[in-house]
């Protein structure tokens, strides 16, 4: 015998092979309209709707990197995650990896973006000492402008992008500085910048604290508290310049950027 209920036909029949259970009614359902059955039996308001997938607004790697940069710059690295980045972009979490192969590589691109703000382009006729002050000062200002990005490098130990190092190298060797002199000067400058910038960033973000110290308060304390002063920073660069001159002697160190850009190796692939 067939019956129809809400557009569904079913047949009820007895099974006599299971005496302990009595008569077992088995319904063979044949749906004439699944959607009709859902709407009539449960009502439209009770039928679960499939969640709408967010529409992707990120179409390039640059947009993904820009979003990550903004988030870390504003909120700090500790609050950053790929999931939060995906929500910011309006895409699925795994979709982020369509644009970057890994979180580590994404952070590398973030560091690279920050370093693109550094003034390391050549100026025709510029004296090497002025170049050193200009570029080092720009590196310091850029890191202090984005302290949370600097923290990324401090915590992840991701190496400085080589494009920046390449630019600095050609900036000075185009001026006539030998590889030997540059190698030694760069090593000293790098150590100096790393120590100075890291301390300046920590103080700006208030990441340093002081405990009770019976020896605090002397002249040595005053000096150490001022070790991230900008004027002192450039005095440190002057010390490096003096050391470079002493090492290069008797070379007069009259190194300058050539007037003709066609002779520069800087910026050429």
Image (cartoon, rainbow, N blue to C red):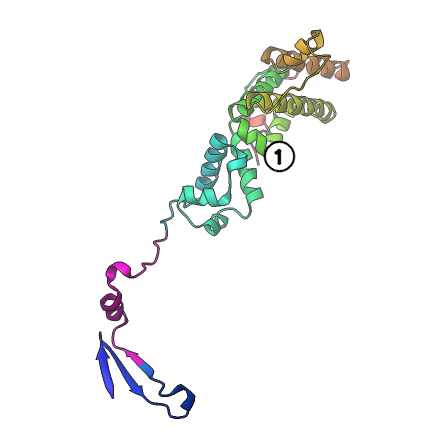
- Asked whether the viewer can see residue 80, the reply is yes
46 or 141: nearer the viewer:
46
On the image, the x and y values in percent for residue 131 come to 60, 18
For this orientation, the residue located farthest to the bottom is: 16
Q: Is residue 12 above or below residue 87?
A: below
Residue drawn 62% across and 23% down?
208
On the image, the x and y values in percent for residue 124 come to 55, 19
Residue numbers of the magenta segment: 29-53
Query: Is residue 63 rendered magenta in the image?
Result: no
Q: Is residue 161 above or below residue 204?
A: below
43 or 230: nearer the viewer:
43
Residue 77 placement: quadrant: top right
Quarter of the image that includes the N terminus: bottom left
Which residue in the protein does label 1 denote? 155
- Left or right, 134 with respect to 241, comes to left
Q: Secondary structure at mark 1?
A: helix
């Amino acid at each position: 015998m067939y019956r129809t209920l809400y557009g569904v036909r079913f047949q009820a029949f007895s099974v006599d092979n299971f005496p302990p259970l009595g008569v077992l009614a088995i319904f063979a359902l044949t749906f004439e309209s699944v959607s009709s059955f859902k709407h009539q039996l449960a009502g439209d308001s009770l039928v679960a709707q499939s969640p709408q997938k967010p529409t992707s607004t990120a179409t390039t790697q640059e947009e993904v990197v820009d979003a990550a940069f903004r988030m870390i710059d504003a909120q700090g690295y500790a609050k950053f995650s790929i999931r939060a980045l995906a929500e910011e972009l309006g895409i699925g979490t795994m979709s982020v990896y369509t644009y970057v192969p890994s979180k580590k590589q994404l952070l590398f691109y973030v560091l690279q973006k920050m370093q693109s703000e550094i003034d390391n382009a050549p100026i025709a006729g510029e004296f090497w000492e002025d170049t050193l002050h200009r570029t080092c000062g720009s590196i310091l200002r850029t890191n202090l402008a984005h302290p949370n990005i600097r923290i990324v490098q401090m915590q992840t130990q991701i190496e400085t992008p080589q494009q920046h190092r390449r630019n600095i190298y050609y900036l000075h060797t185009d001026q006539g500085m030998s590889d030997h002199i540059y190698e030694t000067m760069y090593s000293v400058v790098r150590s100096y910048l790393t120590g100075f910038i890291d301390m300046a960033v920590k103080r700006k973000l208030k990441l340093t604290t002081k405990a009770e110290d019976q020896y605090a308060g002397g002249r040595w304390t005053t000096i150490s508290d001022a070790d991230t002063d900008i004027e002192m920073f450039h005095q440190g660069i002057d010390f490096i310049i003096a050391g470079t001159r002493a090492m290069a002697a008797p070379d007069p160190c009259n190194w300058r950027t050539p007037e003709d850009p066609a002779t520069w190796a800087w910026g050429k692939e």
